[in-house]
Image (cartoon, rainbow, N blue to C red):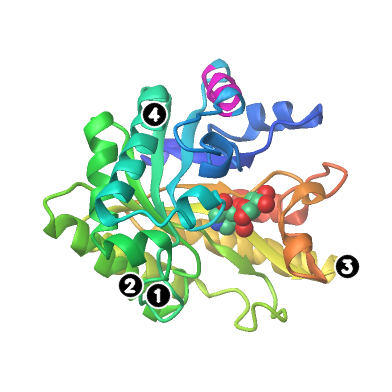
Amino acid sequence: MQKRGRSFIGAAVTLRDEPREPEIIHQDFNSMTPENAMKWESTEPSRNNFTLTDADRYAEFAKKNHLQLHCHTLVWHSQLPLWVSEGGFDNKTLIGVMENHIKKLVTRYRGVCTRWDVVNEALNEDGTYRKSVWYDTIGESFIPIAFSLVRKYDKKVQLFYNDYNLEYNNEKTAGAKRIVKLIKSHGVEIDGVGYQAHLASEATPTAPGAAPDQKTLEAAFHATADEGVNVIYTEIDLRMNTPATADKLKVQAAAYERVAKSCLAVKRCMGMTVWGISDKYSWIPGVFTGEGAALLWDENYNKKPAYAGFLKGIRG
Ligand code: 9MR
């Protein structure tokens, strides 16, 4: 991947007592995303009370292991403490709250974060803006304001807008394109768009459209990349109806291969991150009952066919 001028293959990481994980990260990845530790509820649970011990561990781990750090995430409606979402702040005060948070996090991890997910999941499925304290109080300009604030405190870190279902839902992808244009129209920088890629390898109750084909994936990338920004996959997992069978695992391997190929086929696609290592800890079964087995390693840390499929896609 790097040889082809792309910059990373990453995994979302929760540091836990699993001896296989550091080894796998070391062998297979050159980037990591802290799965939860840098979110607002973890880092500023009450106003101006910053709790960064846990986030610091991830920054240290990344430095020690020479990994890029994809920092996740600053301005999001979810995992946001009530003191923000229900604080009743007026426009000016809320922008101040946003700046205080951004300043603290971005300054502390300056030089360690390679990329920041500046704004996360601001869109509805129909491409309109999602209701949130940010949008309802500040309006759409909360997005360029957030990007300009991150740039104010770190001149180098790459700035991303990150969302899901952009891979196949054209209305939502058009919303992301609009966001790129909006940010630029304010004279503010944006480096790229993160496509989460929480997809399925077969039709499931929560993903009736199953896994997009490669053309669809590439077209979705082009929708924003053609605006002159980079694109990346930020949270790949390809779920199925569980239990997994040998046949389903084969289908999944082919889907992983397509996803990887779609990145390699688009010049502006800079890298890919999978949302976890082992199926043992994936968020999917807890949220989508009867679905799972979405990652590259099974519950016992054995490589699944998906691993070979993904690698095949990367190698072309
Ligand atoms: O994987 C994360 C899980 O451990 C958390 O409980 C969950 C809470 O919202 O967030 C998961 O990660 C999400 C990510 O931060 C943003 N995109 C969707 C991911 C899956 O829900």
User: Which element type, helix, strand or loop, lies under badge 3?
Assistant: loop
Tell me if mark 4 has few (under 14), some (14-19) or many (20+) residues whose alpha carbon lies within 10 angstroms of its own: some
Query: Residue drawn at (37%, 77%), measured in percent from left and top?
Result: 127
Q: Under 8 Å from ligand 1: the CB of mark 3?
A: no
Say if mark 1 contacts mark 2, CB within 8 Å. Answer: yes
Q: Is residue 290 left or right of residue 132?
A: right
Query: Residue drawn at (27%, 46%), measured in percent from left and top?
Result: 147
Q: Under 8 Å from ligand 1: the CB of mark 1?
A: no
Q: Which numbered circle lies on residue 104? A: 4
Q: Mark 4 to mark 1: distance in Å?
A: 31 Å
- Res. 32 in view: no
Is the stretch drawn in magenta largely helix, strand or loop?
A: helix
Where is 79 relative to 33, above or below?
below
Q: Earlier in the sequence, mark 2 or mark 4?
A: 4
- Res. 153 in view: yes
Report the residue marked by disc 3: 243
| Residue 65 picture location, percent across and down | 58, 20
| Residue 183 picture location, percent across and down | 21, 56
Residue 182, by quadrant, is bottom left
Q: Mark 2 to mark 3: distance in Å?
A: 35 Å
Tell me if mark 3 has few (under 14), some (14-19) or many (20+) residues whose alpha carbon lies within 10 angstroms of its own: few
The amino acid beneath tag 2 is Gly
Residue 174, by quadrant, is bottom left
Q: Which numbered circle lies on residue 175? A: 2
Q: Mark 4 to mark 3: distance in Å?
A: 44 Å
Front residue of this view, candidates 167 and 264: 167
Residue 116, by quadrant, is top left
Where is 198 relative to 126, above or below?
above
Count of number-bearing discs: 4
Magenta highlight range = 55-63
Q: Earlier in the sequence, mark 4 or mark 3?
A: 4
Where is 151 relative to 263, above or below?
above
